[in-house]
Image (spheres, helix red, strand yellow):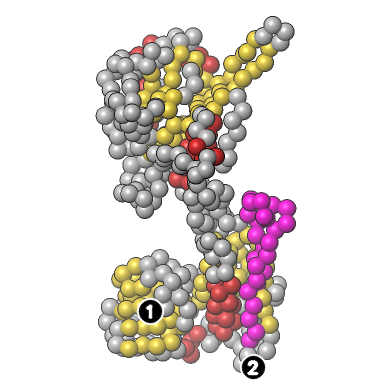
Amino acid sequence: MLRKANNVFSVLLDDETITTLPAERSVVTSANLGNGAVCLVNQGMNRLGAADFAALSDTDTFMLVQGKDAGNQMMKSPVITKGTYSTSIQKHLPAVQQVTTIGYNGTAGSLPSANDTSYYVKIRKNDNDAANRSQPFSLFGQFKTDASATQEELAFGLATNLNKNMADEPANGYLTTEVICDDAGATDGTATTITITNGSVAGVLNAGATTFVVGDLLRIGGATVTDAVYSITAMTATSVTLDRPFTGVSGAGVTIEFITAALATVANFGFRLTGVPAPFDVNAFRNYYANRFTATFSDDSALTTLTVGARNGSGVWQQVAMDEYMNYGFEGQNGMLGVPPRLRDQVVKIPGVGTATAALARYSTLNISWTETVSGLVGMSNARGNVILHTNLDAAGNLATSGSSAETLVVAMGLNAALFDA
């Protein structure tokens, strides 16, 4: 994700809510180009529309500019010669965290259940950070069964221990562990949904239960065998207490099923390990990546399944924030080196900051690159140029039909805006 400032490099990004631009051929200034608006200009800073850009010859030049509001210096790309550049488009791809299951994986598999036996899980980090590239760190979870072991006992014991150990991992806990069971489950006649918060052991049912009791298992989610199960430790009217904190997404009216304690003793169980996104602050935590790990179980007869592979994504707000931040440094904004440091301004949308949501903090990327020959008295060399435009997508994940300044820009360059849609 980190960029290098070799040769010529520039980053611009737009705000999809900015739809007003200066008139075509008028002079673009910081006073008439809004914060987060982008457009094409010639070297005289006249805005180029589609017809103007098409009329440029291969030897004519243009630039991309980004507004920062009145009184603030605009961000300008290097001068680009029309006949020398090429473009590539990368539409937005969301980040995906790794998911690995041990034992039952939703279709097959089981856990061992030998009496008085110690089992452990080893999590070997494969993250691309300074600490784990050369000497990967390992995390462990361990549980010893009693004299009347069951798969249920082992699954819940390991899940509890793993979640406890991961809670000690800095910043984000690294991964969560959930228990899954192959029993189809049943639906209560009255208590069919639950309202529960991530990290809480307490939930509220939509009605008092008529067929499940303390000691039974509660499956919380979409009512499939891949949804996590929890043991019920207490019930009063519509209040229910789980054996460990809920690791799913907070919600109201979440579908539930139950599995009786008797059926659980003969069912197949597994536990699911899911990476947890690390916090990211461009001024502090700058090493963005999706968690990657190798999970091994002490009993190799148990099935280990890589269910979902990790992906960093493309055009995610963390990457865009880092590009924007680094570009300011390349432009000579060295205030961060001062004492006290002066933070660089940001246009990037961050979920939870202001009115930005996860849906509004998505970007697709236009990459403009070219090579120029630089001649000297005694030699000749090639200089590479690279301009990255992160185009902010609307809530539906579209650039086309968004009416944004970025849509206007890419269309003016003769590109199909629909190719940027997520």
Q: Give the numbered dot on residue 202.
A: 1
Whether residue 362 is situated above or below residue 113 in the rendered picture: above
- For the point 45% across and 75% down, which residue is it? 245
Among the two numbered marks 1 and 2 on one chain, the one whose residue lies closer to the N terminus? 2
- Indicate the quadrant where residue 222 lies: bottom left
Instruction: Return the x and y of residue 110 as percentages of the image width and height.
Output: 60, 76
Q: Is residue 223 magenta?
A: no
- Dot 2: few (<14), some (14–19), or many (≥20) neighbours within 10 Å? few
Q: Is residue 135 magenta?
A: yes
In the current view of this chain or complex, which residue is farthest to the top? Answer: 377
- For the point 34% across and 15% down, which residue is it? 46
Quadrant containing the C terminus in the rendered view: top left
- Dot 1: few (<14), some (14–19), or many (≥20) neighbours within 10 Å? many
Please state if 97 lies on the left or on the right of 301 as rendered.
Answer: left
Q: Are marks 1 and 2 in contact (CB under 8 Å)?
A: no
Quadrant containing the N terminus in the rendered view: top right
- Which region of the structure is painted magenta? 121-145
Q: Nearer the viewer, residue 391 or 419?
A: 391
Residue under label 2, please give it.
147
Which element type, helix, strand or loop, lies under badge 2? loop
- Indicate the quadrant where residue 346 lies: top left
Whether residue 10 is situated above or below residue 344 in the rendered picture: above
Query: What is the three-letter code of the residue carrying label 2?
Result: Ala
